[in-house]
Image: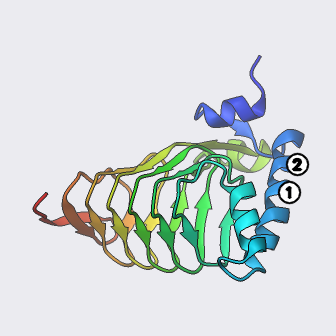
């Protein structure tokens, strides 16, 4: 029988109130408090970044405040940059490539809830789908990336976009819902 955490990471319905998951989220909040109350590049900030995002490559830089569920499900490529107020709900894997930039208020949501009231409200069921963001991607301010999305290499997502479908490589896409505006040279 799978644990709730195993179900969560497999993209299956799970109970978020599970004790193991709750304790991991609390531990994450403790580290986030250190990160968000520190000065970037200080010893305290560097220690919190390492504790929170152990799967981050060199050059990862996050402007506080930053929020996530676990941190352990986030993989950051080289030279990642997130501006203020980034939120990554990482109940499933979030893989971000090299040289990716997030403008302020970017929100990345792997988490979802059932549409039926019974599952969502009475049973407390959740699910999560992985998100993959390729290399050299720029995501504009206030953009929202929904569960299960892949964004291809070199693409640009316009400010305020709601990304509900995969975005291929080498495009500019924007809007709500996000649509391809034009192709870019690779």
Tell me what residue is drawn at x 58 percent, y 72 percent.
62
Quarter occupied by the C terminus = bottom left
In the shown orientation, is residue 170 left or right of residue 144?
left
Q: Residues within 10 Å of mark 1 (few under 14, many from 20)?
A: few
Quarter occupied by the N terminus = top right
- Asked which colour scheme the image uses, the reply is rainbow
| Mark 1 secondary-structure assignment | helix
Task: Say which of 160 and 138 sits in front.
Answer: 138
Q: Which residue is mark 1?
A: 26
Task: Say which of 55 and 138 sits in front.
Answer: 55
Q: Do callouts 1 and 2 mark residues in contact (Cβ within 8 Å)?
A: yes
Residue 71, above or below 101: above
Residue 165, above or below 130: below
In the shown orientation, is residue 90 left or right of residue 78?
right
The image quadrant that residue 176 belongs to is: bottom left
Whole-number angstrom distance, CA of label 1 to CA of label 2: 5 Å
In the shown orientation, is residue 91 left or right of residue 124?
left
Q: Residues within 10 Å of mark 2 (few under 14, many from 20)?
A: few
The image quadrant that residue 68 belongs to is: bottom right
Tell me what residue is drawn at x 80 percent, y 54 percent.
25
Residue 91 in percent (x, y) is at: 65, 47
Residue 107 in percent (x, y) is at: 53, 67
Residue 104 in percent (x, y) is at: 50, 80
| Mark 2 secondary-structure assignment | helix
Q: Which residue is mark 2?
A: 23
Residue 170 in percent (x, y) is at: 19, 58
In the shown orientation, is residue 24 left or right of residue 39?
right
Tell me what residue is drawn at x 43 percent, y 79 percent.
141
């Amino acid at each position: 029988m799978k644990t709730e955490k195993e179900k969560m990471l497999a993209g299956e319905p799970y109970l978020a109130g599970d004790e193991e998951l709750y304790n991991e989220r609390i531990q994450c909040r403790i580290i986030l408090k250190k990160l968000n109350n520190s000065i970037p590049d200080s010893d305290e900030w560097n220690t919190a970044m390492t504790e929170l995002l152990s799967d981050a490559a060199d050059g990862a830089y996050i402007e506080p405040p930053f929020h996530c569920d676990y941190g352990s499900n986030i993989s950051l490529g080289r030279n990642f940059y997130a501006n203020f107020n980034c939120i990554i709900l990482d109940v499933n894997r979030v893989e971000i490539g090299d040289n990716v930039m997030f403008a302020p208020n970017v929100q990345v949501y792997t988490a979802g809830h059932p549409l039926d009231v019974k599952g969502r409200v009475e049973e407390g069921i959740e699910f999560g789908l992985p998100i993959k963001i390729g290399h050299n991607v720029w995501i504009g301010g206030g953009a929202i990336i929904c569960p299960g999305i892949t964004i291809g290499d070199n693409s640009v997502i316009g400010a305020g976009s709601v990304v509900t479908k995969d975005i291929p490589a080498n495009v500019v896409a924007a809007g709500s819902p996000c649509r391809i505006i034009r192709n870019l040279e690779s």
